[in-house]
Amino acid sequence: MIIIMENAIDILKEWIDKSDNIVFFGGAGVSTESGIKDFRSEGNYLRKGNLTLEQLISATYFREHTKDFYDMYRSLFDNTGIMPNITHKRLAELEKEGKLKAIVTQNVDGLHQLAGSKNVLTLHGDVSRNYCLDCHKLYDEKFVFSSKGIPRCECGGIVKPDVVLYEEGLDQEILEKSINAIANADVLIVAGTSLSVYPAAGLVNYYKGNKLVLINKTSTPYDSKADLLLHEPLGEIFSKI
C-alpha cells in the first residue's frame, strides 16, 4: 500500500496516463464541492423527531406518509441550479479520451450526466427520472420539484422518483453491469465515499487488479486494501490530473 502524500498525485497521474480501462466508483463526497449536502457526514445526519434518515427515505414512509415524504424529498434532493464541479468534468473528459470506461455512483443527483459522462451506472437511481406508479408515464425532475403536495400524473397516479429507497433492492441489471465493470478494470478509483453503505460498498471486493485508488477525506474500512490512498479534497486532486 502506498501512502506517500508527496508523490501520490504523480503516481495517480502515471496510472491514468498508462491505462485505457479505468472505472470510477463514487459517493456523496463527489458532489459536496458542487454544494450538495452529504447528510451522512458529521453534523448533517438528518433526523425528524424520532425518525432517522433511513426511516424518512424508506419505502414504508413513502407509503404511509406520502405527502410528508415529498415535502422532505424536495428539501433534500432539489438540486436546481447546482452545476458539476471539476471532478465531474474531468471524469467526463477521461471518458471522451477513451480512458474511463464506466462511472459507478451512489449519487442520485445526475451531475455526472450533466457534465457529459455517458456510461453512468446509478446504483441508487436518478432524481431526473420519475414515473407514474399506475400508467408508468415518465416525468422529469422539474415536474416533481415544482409540484405541491403529492405529484400526480395526468391519469391520477402518484409520480414516484426513480430512486432506491431504504427497504428496496438495487436494480439488478445496473448492479451486474457495475460488478462487471469493476471486476474487469485496470485502475479502480474509489472516491468521496465512506464505503459504509451496503450492498454498494461491497462492490470494491470484485476488483481483481493492483491499482486500487482510495480518495476520501476520512478513513474507510477498505484503506488497508488500497494501493494508493489519498486523504485530500477531490477538487484539488482532479484539478491536477
Image: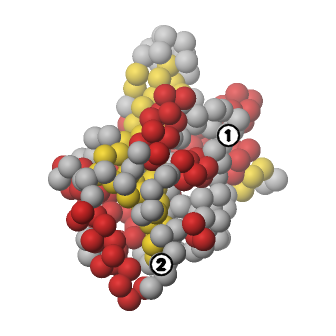
Q: Nearer the viewer, residue 42 or 191?
A: 191
Residue at position x 58%, y 52% in the image: 205
Name the residue furthest left. 97
Residue identified by numbered label 1: 166
Q: Secondary structure at mark 1?
A: loop
Q: What's the residue at 74%, 32% (across, down)?
A: 60
Circle 2 packing at 10 Å, graded few (<14), some (14-19), many (20+), is: some
Q: Quadrant of residue 46?
A: bottom right
Position of residue 3 measured from the top left corner of the image (x, y, whole percent): 49, 81
Task: Name the quadrant containing residue 4.
Answer: bottom left
Q: Which mark is residue 2?
A: 2
Q: Is residue 117 visible?
A: yes
Q: Nearer the viewer, residue 99 or 95?
A: 99
Mark 1: amino acid: Tyr
Where is residue 72 shown, x and y percent of the image?
61, 45
Disc 2 marks a residue whose amino acid type is Ile
The quarter of the image holding the C terminus is bottom left
Find residue 84 and report its horizontal and vertical position in percent: 31, 57
16 vs 27, left or right, is left
